[in-house]
Amino acid sequence: MPIAKDPRAHTALSQGGRSAASGAGLSVNPPVVRMSTVLFDSLASLREAEELRAQSERSLTYAANGNPTAFALEDLINELEGAHGTCLYPTGLNAVGQMFQAFLRPGQHVLITEAVYPPVRRLARTLLTAFDIEFDYYAADGSDIEALIKPNTRMIYAEVPGSQTFALCDLPALARLCKTRELLLAVDNSWGSGVLFKPLELGADISLMALTKYVAGHSDVMMGSVSTTQAHFETLKTMQIAMGSTVSPDDAYLVLRGARSLAARLAMHERNALQVAQWLQAQPQVAQVMYPALPEHPGHALWQRDFHGCNGLLSFEFNSDAAGTTDRFVSALQLFGIGYSWGGFESLVSEVYLFTDGRSRQVLRLQIGLENPNDLIADLQAGFGHL
């Protein structure tokens, strides 16, 4: 059994991001403050606000630099991540790109996990290559990292676990290596969502989340966050201000409202997904099920040690690679929507391609939602009936 979910998260999700310092008023939910221009009583007060902003302090000068509703959400993410500071971005992928821009310079090198979210590969090919920043990929379990570190390596980018096969690496060990080599360690924490996993507490310098997923939880808003320790926040914030990155107060409000039920939703996702995963293991058409809470998962021991639970994501592979198997199975499903993303209340299915030893393998990734798990199992059973 996993260790108990972080008890601090339950209170933080209910109470966090509601202080008077986060925005106007004392309402249960911070209000939506729509704005662009900020008016000042005098030039002196405007200059004072600009001075605070120049020091990476929170200051209302112009809406491109933030708004009170977004500030409230930043406060909540800081509590969940155990961070000194957080910046918000329009999407999770945009958060990754701006994080790279903030901390990497031409001529430097970054190591990226082989298990990375696929669009980050495209980002590396376009953004990093355009700015003469080198990159290589390391094994998902981190076993070959030391051999790949170069004199110009600046950062190691991890995704724990990977969002397709849920491969795990030993993050505390990786953090110790980074400290020894004076490297930055950035971790995609979208899977953990600030409740199930705490990269900064385990030694990372930077933690990123696609708030679009479990934190918002209702499949109706896009947003990303980057949280850092005190040593690195000014660098991040300076780049955010320079780029004019911001999120709308309406979107920040939706993420805040969704986050209030995050811990409760994750517990239900986990219960449902574990039941489905165990059922899938017993099906003769299934070669393997990839879900960290299963004892058979290769990273299960690390999951037990470092995580506060599991979520609703799992992948499985068919025994047969006969043409049309996946299409016939998915076409028979009624409750699983076919689409990208995960973390909402609804169940989804998508195809994933894995590359090992020069060979491509197709697996299905399931987002197990909040439906009755027996209904989901019956739907999957119907899919197997069409093979």
Image (cartoon, grey):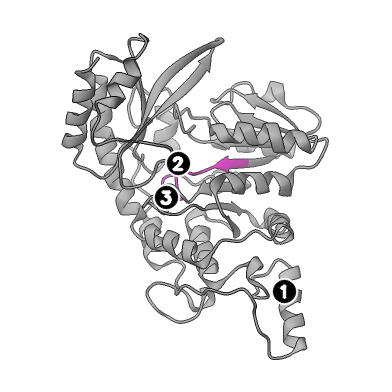
Please tell me which residue is depicted at 67% across the width and 57% down the height of the picture.
233
Distance (Cα) linking label 2 and label 3: 9 Å
Pick whichever, 12 or 373, lies toward us.
Answer: 373
Pick whichever, 138 or 372, lies toward us.
Answer: 372
Pick whichever, 201 or 236, lies toward us.
Answer: 236
Above or below, 308 against 225 in this view is above
Q: For residue 260, which quarter of the picture?
A: bottom left
Please tell me which residue is depicted at 51% across the width and 70% down the height of the picture.
69
Q: Amino acid at mark 3?
A: Val
Above or below, 242 against 382 in this view is below
The answer to whether residue 245 is left or right of residue 170 is right
Q: Amino acid at mark 1?
A: Leu
Count of numbered marks: 3
On-image quarter of the C terminus: top left
Residue at far bottom of view: 41
Circle 1 residue: 52
Please tell me which residue is depicted at 55% across the width and 50% down the height of the picture.
91
Magenta highlight on residue 194: yes
Circle 3 residue: 195
Distance (Cα) linking label 1 and label 2: 34 Å
Circle 2 residue: 191
Please tell me which residue is depicted at 71% across the width and 38% down the height of the picture.
127
User: Residue 132 in the image: x percent, y percent?
Assistant: 80, 34
Stretch of the chain drawn in magenta: 186-196
